[in-house]
Structures are given as C-alpha cells and as structure tokens.
Image: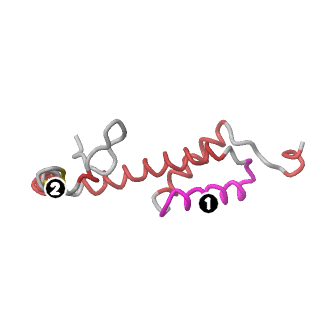
Amino acid sequence: MLRQIYGFKIFAGHRARELKAWLVGEAENATTNHDLAYRFVDERRRTRTVLPGISVIERLCADALVAAERRIDSAIVARLDELLKAHLDALLTEMVEGKVSRFVWLQPIRGGTELGRYHPPA
C-alpha cells in the first residue's frame, strides 16, 4: 500500500536488470565498494525504487566492480605489444630471497578469481 501511495517500484524483473546495468557503468568511476553502494542507494532514491537487502547491494556492487576492473584490464592489455607482455609476465618470476615473487599480489588468487594479473586477448 505504501509503495502505491508514494509511487515506489520494486527491485525485480526488468527494473532490476536496468539498475544492474546502470551499476556496472558506474563501477568504472567508483573509488571503492562503499562509494559504489552510496551511488546505488542514491540512484534508487532518484528512481523511487525500493532497496534490496544489504547483502544483495554488497554483492551487486562487488560484481560490478569486478566486471569494471576486467574491462579496464582488457583495455590496457589490448594496447600492449607481445614483447611488453612477455616482459611483464617475466616480472612474476622475480623472487625475493628465492621464496616468493616480489609481485605476488598480481598472481591469480588460488581457489578464486584471477583478478590483477593480465591475460593477453585470444
């Protein structure tokens, strides 16, 4: 009844798809998950859409940020020549005290996604 009185729409169906697409676009400009979540909440207010639960918002923002990071990584890698890609890959084999790569943070996360490390386009 309150939705009808105040003109709020539910977050489902095509509206949810539209808002998810909007979020993915915003993710490239967001500085943090927190920033993106605030943008999401502001957009819901503007469109008069009922907010989903916080866990849904967190997941939507995290997924949008990962997608944006991958698009940005792909755009950067697409501009690199093969020699530069080989040099960057070689950095991952540089070891500190013979134990761990100095650039371990660029390597794929075990058991998770491969964020951070570039992959040449096929």
* Residue 102 sits in quarter: bottom left
Residue shown at 65% from the left, 47% from the top: 54
Q: Quadrant of the C terminus?
A: top left
Residue 44 percent location from the top left of the image: 69, 54
For marks 1 and 2 on the same chain, the one whose residue lies earlier in the sequence: 1
Which residue is denoted by mark 2 in the rendering? 88
| Colouring of the image | secondary structure
Looking at the picture, how far across and down is residue 45, in whole percent? 72, 57
Q: Secondary structure at mark 1?
A: helix
Q: Amino acid at mark 2?
A: Leu
Report the amino acid beneath label 1. Answer: Tyr
Q: Residue at x 57, y 48 (%)?
A: 58
Left or right of 81 in this view: 49:
right
Residue in the image at 84% along x and 46% along y: 3
Q: Position of residue 82 (x, y in %)?
A: 12, 52
The label on residue 97 is none
Horizontally, residue 115 falls left or right of residue 87, namely right
Query: Which span is picked out in magenta?
Result: 31-50
Q: Main secondary structure of the magenta part?
A: helix
- Give the alpha-carbon distance from disc 1 to disc 2, as whole Å: 36 Å
Q: On the rendered image, what quadrant is the N terminus found in?
A: top right
Please tell me which residue lies in front, 99 or 74: 99
Check the image and report above or below for 106 versus 31.
above
Magenta region includes residue 42: yes
Question: Quick one: 24 or 61, which is closer to the camera?
Answer: 61
The residue closer to the viewer here, 105 or 46, is: 105
Q: Name the residue at 60% across, 60% down.
A: 39
17 up-or-down from 65: above or below: above
Asked if residue 71 is among those painted magenta in the image, a careful observer would answer no
Residue, disc 1 = 38
